[in-house]
Image: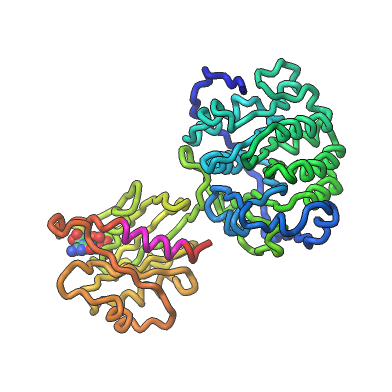
Amino acid sequence: MSTSNQNTKKKKRNVFIVINQINLYYKNIIICFIPYKSYNQDLNNITLGDIMNKNNVFKTNIPKLDEFLNGGLRVSTITMLWATPGIDNSPFAYQTIVGRLEMGDRCIYVNQSKMSNAVIDEIEHYGWNIRDYIEGGDFIFLDAYSGLINVESKERFFIKDPKNPKEITKGINDLLEKENSKNTMIVYDSISTMIDHCGENSIEELKKWKKIFYGKNAFGILLFTEWPYDKKILNELRLISDAIIELKAIEERVILREFFLVSKVEWNGKTKKGGTVPFKISAPGGIMVYVPKILVTGPYNAGKTSLIHSISDRAVSVERVGTTIALDHGHVDYAGFSVDLFGTPGQERFDPILEQLGGEALGVIAVLDATNPDSFPRVKEMLAKTKSAGLPCVIAANKVDLPGALSIDEIKEHLKLNRTIPILPVTAEDKSKIKEDEPAQLKKEQLYAIFDVLFSKIV
Ligand SMILES: Nc1nc2c(ncn2[C@@H]2O[C@H](COP(=O)(O)OP(=O)(O)OP(=O)(O)O)[C@@H](O)[C@H]2O)c(=O)[nH]1
Ligand SMILES: [Mg+2]
């Protein structure tokens, strides 16, 4: 059994490296796609059928990512978590580990760049329980770090000389050979450390790993940080990888935004281009798709503030006698998305600021009062003023609990929109609690339905 330090305290600390004053621009991302043949020739005993087998699909547990991976990871493959220096790729591995363990798989974590206790601390930092799996023997460390720093390993399984890549391969093979009927995910942390110590020889070992995985229901997630390595090494790494998930950053004004993109998926047969997914890592919670701005607009008194307050984990409004005079802001974490909502004031006298508020929004929720068709032209006007054309948009037909409220079809007819925008109903949770000058509590499940539709259009 692994002998993780039971006294390890749960530490609150920031595990991310912040880059200051560095301009990282990746607008011209070269998406590298290597046709399937090149890979297949390399490993002639693994067939396309093996890799494509849908019964062996392993979800990563990371929102949106599985969509780009044609459902998830595959047996006998190597997936590279390819990070730009300064971006931590380990939370991606942790989140997948936790998901796989919950699904009944086992995980071998080869730690070569940090102590196993540091890995446990970090996983717990995100609020995930890992100790039960360690004790149950489903989460196993293969310690390749102690040997590097010349201390005795406390783990049951360790590599004596981690500078010898053949020993690493043998260590992985021995663990996989042990009788086990479960699917096994091998996490290697990290390939950069391996290359630093073992040089180009590492690449030859990686090729062997895929063959070792074959027949043992195993697959690998390898952590790699792209330090300034020789181009030849980088190219070989790309070739060996069956899938590459790149983690990059882009500077927007003074904020550094992180995003991932899948630049290679062998088992997909093609690369889904242009799919960059901005992400944010919260503790607890893990990786979320980050949507920095959703605009909530609509006529005076339609229910914008009510919507933002009802759905948000935390919300701020600037109101005067029940009407919004400056801004509504709320934050929602839902369905793997982390979203900032910005509400516009409804009154026409604030129209000059509508245009500014609409800038940089990734989606729009237009709220209308279903009992007040006279205000519908104003909905269209506000959509135009916030420059919402072209943005994913949903209309929330609010107050459908009130007598005289129009049906969704009637609203559609009245609005006469020249593009198809989904219209979904919204009602107050409890009509008896409605107060004239206060935002109402709206039904959460209806609001989540609106988000589901909107999010499906955003990334
Ligand atoms: N019956 C009913 N009343 C609602 C509903 N949603 C909001 N209200 C009420 O409608 C009024 C206006 O709601 P707000 O959320 O302040 O509307 P708003 O769009 O932010 O208004 P402005 O900021 O002034 O443009 C309040 O009195 C709410 O209690 C609903 O679904 N049903
Ligand atoms: Mg308001």
Q: Residue at x 42, y 53 (%)?
A: 340
Residue 452 included in the magenta stretch of the image: yes
Q: Main secondary structure of the magenta part?
A: helix
The quadrant holding residue 277 is: bottom right
Q: Position of residue 458 (x, y in %)?
A: 50, 63
Ligand number 1: quarter of image: bottom left
Q: Position of residue 373 (x, y in %)?
A: 24, 78
Picture layout, residue 111 above or below residue 273:
above
Picture layout, residue 186 above or below residue 267:
above
The quadrant the N terminus occupies is top right
Magenta span? 445-455
Residue 92 included in the magenta stretch of the image: no
Q: Is there any visible trace of residue 323 in the rendered image?
A: no
The quadrant holding residue 33 is: bottom right
Picture layout, residue 195 above or below residue 24:
above
Q: Residue at x 70, y 47 (%)?
A: 80
Front position in the image: 121 or 362: 121
Front position in the image: 122 or 5: 5
Left or right: residue 428 versus residue 311 is: left
Q: Position of residue 140 (x, y in %)?
A: 63, 30
Q: Position of residue 187 (x, y in %)?
A: 67, 38
The quadrant holding residue 434 is: bottom left
Left or right: residue 362 versus residue 162 is: left
Front position in the image: 289 or 267: 267
Number of marks in the image? Answer: 0
Judging from the image, the colouring scheme is rainbow
Q: Residue at x 67, y 59 (%)?
A: 27
